[in-house]
Amino acid sequence: MHFGLRARSTRAVGRRTWMLAALSTTALVVSGLTPVAATAETSVTPTGETAVTSAAETSVTPTAETTWLCKPGLVSDPCLSSEETTVELGDGSSFAQPAQPASSPPIDCFYVYPTVSSQLTTNANLDIDPEETQIAIDQASRFSQTCNVYAPIYPQLTLLAISTPGSVTPEASLEAYLGVLSAWKEYLAKYNDGRGIVLIGHSQGAFLLKQLIKEQIDPNPALRKQLVSAVLLGGNVLVPKGKTVGGEFQNIPACQVAWQAHCVVAYSSFLKEPPEGADFGRVNSPLVEKTLTEEEAEKFEVLCVNPSLLVQGDYAGPLLRYESTSPFPGFLGLLGYIRAPKAPTPWVSMPGQYTAQCEHANGASWLQLTNVGPAGETREQVAEVLGPLWGTHLEDVNVALGNLVELTALQSWTYQLENRPPPPPPRGGRGFAPPVHHQPARRGIERRPKPRGRHG
C-alpha cells in the first residue's frame, strides 16, 4: 500500500499520538519483554504496575471457533486474490507481470495484521470488515505464492479506542493477545498437520507475535523445528549488540543468510537516521523504555535484518516494492492517509527505485531506504507520513514485499531439505550388501563326476 506524503499538521500529529499510545500499551502490557530475562508471566503497565499476561496463568478459555480471514478452503479468501502486476520502470515504461498463488505450497504462513479496525469499540469484534480484507490483500496475499496463508480475525485494539485517552486498558490489550493465542492453538490442532510455519506480523501484529513466540515457540524444541521463519516488521525486536540471539528470544536467532531457516527477519525502515526519541529503531523508544534500565539499554539494539541481501553485511541491496492499487476503506482511507497508486492491474511494482541497508549509528539501528531511481521519475515515492520519529513505518511491508516473498521461498526450500524422508534401503538385502546372483545351469550339458582310481 502507499501512504501519501502530507505536511505535518495538527491532525497528523494527533494521529501519531494515538497510534503511539496504542503501540506503547500493546508493547508494555502484552509483550512484557525484558531483554535480560524474558518472562511470559508478567508485564509492566504504563503506571509501572505488574500485570499477568501469560495465557497459561489465566483462566480464559475460547468459547467459539476462530473466524478466519484467510484459510485454505474458504469460499472468499482475500489471500488468494489476483496478483497480476504492472511493473513500472524508472524510464516511464511498463509491462505486465503474471503471478498467482501456488497450487500446493509445502508450508503454511500464520499472519497477524496491524491496527486497521474502524469499529467504535475498544476491542474489535470478530466480524470481517473491509479494512481487514484489504490489509490481508495488501500485506499477506502475495505470500500465497510460497505458503498456505492462515489469518485469524482477532479482537485487536481499534483505531478509535487508541485515539481516546484511557480507553486502552491492560485487560483490552490482553484480550487482543489471547485472541491471537486461541487462533494459534486452533490452527495447530486442526490444520497444521506437522507442516512448516512462517509467522508474519506488522506493528500491533508484530508485537503480539513476539509474545506468542516467547511463550509458545522459543521454549519448545518441537515448535522451533517447525518454525520456518518469523517476519516481525515494525516491532522493535531487541538483541544484544553484535549478536544474533538473546534478548527477546533465547533460542531463535536472527537470519544471516537468505536460505537460513528457524530464524527471525525484523527491521524498522527509515529514510534517514532515527532521531532521539524515535518510536522505532532505538532501544530507548517510548515503546520499550519502561522495561529497560539505562544499563540494559547500553547492551541491546533493535534488530535489523536486510531482506534484500542473500548474505547479511554492511552493504545495500535492491528492494522489490509492490503496492496494491485498491483504495483502502475505513478511517485510514477516508482521512487520506493511505493512497493507492493507479494502474490497470490489482498490483503495481517499482523495481530499481529504492535500495536498503542496515545501519547502526549513535545508538540507533534501522533499515535505511535510499532512492536510487532516475531524476524526475513519476513513480510514487515512499514518505515519512507520520513524521521522522516514525520513519517509514507504514511502508515496512510493501517497500520490500517482493524480497520477503522470495526470502520465504528460499527458507521453505531449506526446510523441505531438512525434513525430506530418508532414502529407502538398497534393494537386495540388509544394509549395503550386494545381492547374490546365481548362475543358471546350462541345458543340454550333463556334468559327470570325475572317475577315481588308479587310472584316474
Image: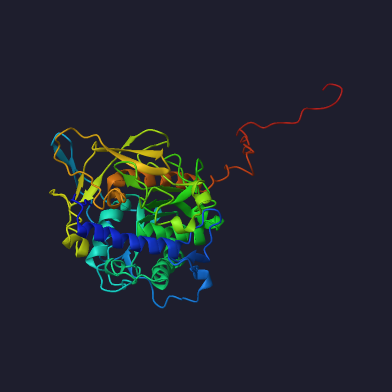
* The C terminus lies in quadrant: top right
Q: Nearer the viewer, residue 197 or 73?
A: 197
Q: Which picture quadrant has residue 92?
A: top left
Residue nearest the viewer, comparing 71 with 241? 241
Q: Which of 421 and 50 is in front in this view?
A: 50
Residue 65, above or below 22:
below
Where residue 325 appears, as percent x and y from the top left, is 17, 52
Say if residue 250 shows up in the picture: yes
Is 224 placed left or right of 405 in the picture?
right
State the scheme by which the image is colored: rainbow
**Residue 146 left/right relative to 185:** left
Q: Is residue 150 visible?
A: no
Tell me which residue sits at (40%, 66%) in the image. Answer: 180
- Residue 230 horizontal side relative to residue 380, left or right: right
* Percent coordinates x, y for residue 433 in the rendering: 64, 38
Q: Give the percent coordinates (x, y) of residue 336.
A: 17, 58
The residue lying furthest to the top in this view is: 455
